[in-house]
Image: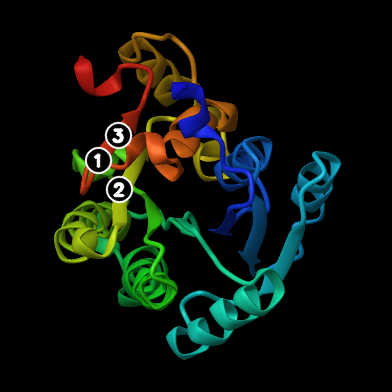
Amino acid sequence: MILNSFDLQGKVAIVTGCDTGLGQGMAVGLAQAGCDIVGINIVEPNDTIAKVEALGRKFLSLKADVSKIDELPQLIDQAVTTFGHVDILVNNAGIIRREDAIKFSEKDWDDVMNINVKSVFFMSQTVAKQFIAQKTGGKIINIASMLSYQGGIRVPSYTASKSGVMGITRLMANEWAKEGINVNAIAPGYMATNNTAPLRADEKRSSEILERIPANRWGTPEDLMGPIVFLASSASDYINGYTIAVDGGWLAR
């Protein structure tokens, strides 16, 4: 039966940046579908741990800075030591810095690029090596953005990094599909999260954004649960290198 294709019982999913917001929503959605979770965060994700364990799933919490590339293999080793295997990687960890392009600093450029695109590639590379060693294939889901498609304003490094995420998603899919590894991405629209708090606090900007969204609301972490389970499951086995926009219709306007 087709619904069995969405069942993730016995799977282990690594989710970076799952303390709050979209990352938490995706981790909980994967747990609801049957996954045990490995959360990689710079803080202890106590609320997410409680939500996952309340579903009867296991949660391994690893505190780390994913921009420290040389530490990534050790993190994956810890996951495999605990659970015996890994099956899914969700590259959600990311940051944003806002400033006019004319005044944007090198530090704000480098900090965002290092976490949002450099660490996504090297985390994917590390996990892909594990998938290949396991000979079981696997699923890698990157988190892109509306600014993978559009320019935006006052977020030059974020736009560059998320455009890069869409590009390397395609490249990794091209190279690793033969290994049974599916690499895809989700591009969330305007979501009610910590990253968008300044936009939602600006009454004029928030109103302008809502006027363009056909669904007429900000997205929520729960809106990503279905797409993440789909891309993590065997139901998406013939989807490679694609970025799914979950945006309430923003790009359709």
Few, some or many C-alpha atoms within 10 Å of disc 2 (few <14, some 14-19, many ≥20)? many
Mark 3 Cα-neighbour bin, 10 Å: few <14, some 14–19, many ≥20? some
Q: Nearer the viewer, residue 128 or 216?
A: 128
Horizontal side, residue 215 vs residue 251: left or right: right
Quadrant location, the C terminus: top left
- Give the residue at the far front of this rendering: 1
Q: Nearer the viewer, residue 193 or 176?
A: 176
- The secondary element bearing badge 2 is classed as strand
The Cα atoms of the two marked residues, 1 and 3, are separated by: 11 Å
Determine whether the residue tagged by mark 3 lies in a helix, strand or loop.
strand
Of the residues shown, which amino acid type is indicated by label 3?
Ile
Asked whether the residues under the numbered discs 2 and 3 touch, taking CB atoms below 8 Å apart as contact, a structural biologist would say yes
Q: Residue 217 placed where, x, y %?
A: 48, 14
Which label belongs to residue 184? 2
* Residue 244 tag number: 3
Tell me whether circle 2 and circle 1 mark residues in contact (CB < 8 Å).
yes
Q: Where does the image place residue 97, in percent across and percent down from the top left?
A: 42, 58
Identify the mark at residue 162; answer none if there is no mark. Answer: none
Identify the residue under disc 1: 239
